[in-house]
Amino acid sequence: MIIKKIKIGKIKVPLITPFKTALRTVEAVEDIVVIIETDRGNKGFGEAPPTAVITGDTHESIIGAINLIGKQLIGKNIEDFNKLIEIVQGALVKNTSAKAAVEIALYDLFAQSLGKPLYKVLGGGSNELKTDLTISVDSVEKMVEDSLKAVEKGFDELKIKVGKNLNIDIERMKAIFDAVGPNIKLRLDANQGWTVKESLYAIKKIEEYGIVLDFVEQPVKAHNIDGMIKVTSEVLSPILADESIFSPRDAIEVITRNAADIVNIKLMKTGGISNALKIINICEIYNIPCMIGCMLEAGISVTAAAHLASAKSSIITRIDLDGPALCSENPIDGGIVMEGSKMILSDELGLGIKGIDGFELLIELN
């Protein structure tokens, strides 16, 4: 199975409601898509969102990086899979979202070449998963309303975005807890929006109110590992490291320094599935649970993350893959099927994706 053509393009999907965090506000998914085609007619699909405030990647940088990587893949055999991954990871430094998009497409094709869905190639698992749903930061009233709507749709795990105003953040959590009740699992994501003192104050106030948080995600700045250590050591709630961990080396530092209780894996941070697997192995060694998460992504890369979560469910104990659920429409033909909080994996080969509506071609390599 020889790589003959690589298409780089983009898709745009409006969100149901604006996505608001302590770092940004977004109204539509506008992702770069890569399609790798082989001499046998197989197609592998990958996707990357521009998340400049987190990964540093923009539309332009992702396109440029995929173009650079793609030129080195033309004519290569999918059977030489490890060599292809080396090419992707060695073509340039950083640019993790672009690398992830290309890797996802390659893993898609590799699984197709073996005649299996990706999750079975990665080790096998259940074809049915469950995700949480993100509640964007907004007025207390709006967040309560959004939380109740999510529960009505069948979500029993909610990730609450905070980090813009400390005292209002506390009121947000109290109001949502009072509205949805104790049987709904609440996760809190500050997106680096608090200082260490603010984190300790807010988390303890929330705990004193009787709210049992499933975790608190990245309360302080990503580079402030000492701050993460202090917060982790002084609160009861588990602390999850997100932006602090991009690479396997980052994971080792955070874990060995006791800077978090849980590790968040996102393919757009790790540069794809290969490094995600390394982080999972590290977490297995240290007995640290993982969550699999996503940026604002449509169904291509979320499908890949879901396949990984299925195959590694013993260590990936939490799933935050709600990107498609936040979209007003689904442009992806195939891949995962979202039914409320339920995610159903296809047993089609690879990722099971057949095509993309609204794909706008930008560059073609052959």
Image (spheres, rainbow, N blue to C red):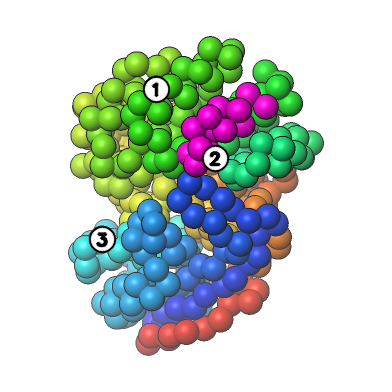
* Crowd class of label 2 (few under 14; some 14 to 19; many from 20; radius 10 Å): many
Q: Position of residue 59 (x, y in %)?
A: 42, 72
Dot label at residue 200: 1
Disc 3 marks a residue whose amino acid type is Lys
Q: Residue at x 57, y 72 (%)?
A: 11
Report which quarter residue 197 is drawn in: top left
- In primary-sequence order, the first of circles 2 and 1 is 2
Disc 2 marks a residue whose amino acid type is Lys
Q: Position of residue 79 (x, y in %)?
A: 33, 65
Q: CA distance from mark 3 to mark 2?
A: 27 Å
Which is closer to the viewer, label 3 or label 1?
Answer: 1
In the depicted structure, whether residue 247 falls above or below residue 106: above
Q: Is residue 168 magenta?
A: yes
What residue range appears in magenta?
161-175
In the depicted structure, whether residue 157 falls above or below residue 65: above
47 and 137: which is toward the camera: 137
Q: Which residue is mark 3?
A: 94
* Crowd class of label 3 (few under 14; some 14 to 19; many from 20; radius 10 Å): some
Disc 1 marks a residue whose amino acid type is Leu
